[in-house]
Amino acid sequence: MSNNSETDGIKAAIFAMGFGAYGFWNGFKMLKLRRKMGDIPTSKISSAAVGSFVEVQGKVVCAPGDFITAPLTGIKGVCFVWHIEEQRGSGKNKKWVTVNYFYSCPFLYIKDKSEHLAAIDLEHCDFQEKMHDKLVNFNNRSFDLPASAKKILHEYKMFNIENKAGFFSSSNYRMSEKVFKANDPLYVLGGTINPPESETTRLSSGANIFGTRNKPVAEEVQAILEQAKSNPEIVKMYDKDGNSKLDSAELTQLHKDIQNKIFTDYNLSHQSSYLQKCKLFFTMVEDHDVVFSMKKVFVSHNSEKDLSQKLLLKASLGLLGGPLLFISGIFFLIEAFKR
């Protein structure tokens, strides 16, 4: 056997072992999640205990006149999520790397049969179904996208649409769009806390970027914030550590005070009238289960019964197929070294 063939055989064996180990771990994870679903009874939103892990089933709701048309699919919905990836590397080393997640609004609202409301923090959701209703590919040379999509990319500074790359320096991207429509059924399992005062408490950071339902007000908040940051008197007022500049926590407090003042002056509700009516807010909460920790919010369009069956199938495939693949990898590794 040639050295190249031997090396390829070893790589394949190690890959099989790694994939088998991951399959077993993931199967165990699915089994623990299924058991957690069975252990936590489905609650009414009105009677669920804030501060605990809660399971509810409901439908997506939306404030009157708050519907949007998703740019890629053209679907009229409540909100949409974009997952933007860039292709990096070359040849066999090509891979897709996440660049941004864009949420057209930070929270999703559901109501159960008793008409009570809960808010879901989209940033911290673990979606169980496919993450897209449509997937498009584009590059930063032509930006072959709908005008509404390009406007959002430019507005939220994800790309500089006006500064297109040259032919030899362009990069390939893909964007998936997930749309949530009014009355979509949702099964939700996750940690809960008291709802925040407003949607604008969720600030864009890193790869996660948030749109807003009330853009004119949000734009005015941002404009005043930019002016306030260069005002020595305001800087002195919020500079708690006395270093003559505003750090992240101080800027956040200034942002909150400005938005609260504007909301009061406009006599508007905080971004969505639904948020003040919510008892539960599903978000990332530390799960102290030493065997399987579930921090994110588990969200599915399926019923609990259908989801339980799917999890059992995935768990069975992982727990049975994982060890078999791992053992096969060991066998091929031994054979490769024998030669």
Image (spheres, helix red, strand yellow):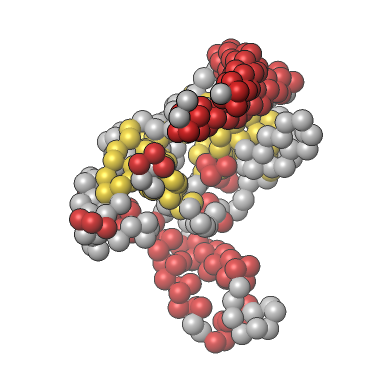
- Residue 135's place in the image compared with 260, above or below, is above
Residue 43: x, y in percent?
68, 25
The residue lying at 68 percent from left, 22 percent from top is: 28
Q: Is residue 136 left or right of residue 228?
A: left
Residue 40: x, y in percent?
72, 23
The residue lying at 50 percent from left, 29 percent from top is: 6
Q: Quadrant of residue 57?
A: top right
Q: Nearer the viewer, residue 73 or 270?
A: 73
Q: Is residue 331 left or right of residue 11?
A: right
The residue lying at 77 percent from left, 33 percent from top is: 289
The residue lying at 27 percent from left, 54 percent from top is: 170
Residue 312 visible within the image: no
Residue 284: x, y in percent?
64, 43
Q: Nearer the viewer, residue 188 or 315?
A: 315
Residue 266 visible within the image: yes
Q: Quadrant of residue 154?
A: bottom left
Residue 205: x, y in percent?
52, 57
- Residue 302's place in the image compared with 169, above or below, is above
**Residue that lies at the very extreme toward the bottom in this rendered image:** 232
Q: Quadrant of residue 124?
A: top right
- Residue 333's place in the image compared with 296, above or below, is above
Q: Nearer the viewer, residue 199 or 136?
A: 136
Q: Is residue 143 left or right of residue 229?
A: left
Query: How many labels were placed on the picture?
Result: 0
Which quadrant of the rendered structure holds the C terminus?
Answer: top right
Q: Nearer the viewer, residue 218 or 326?
A: 326
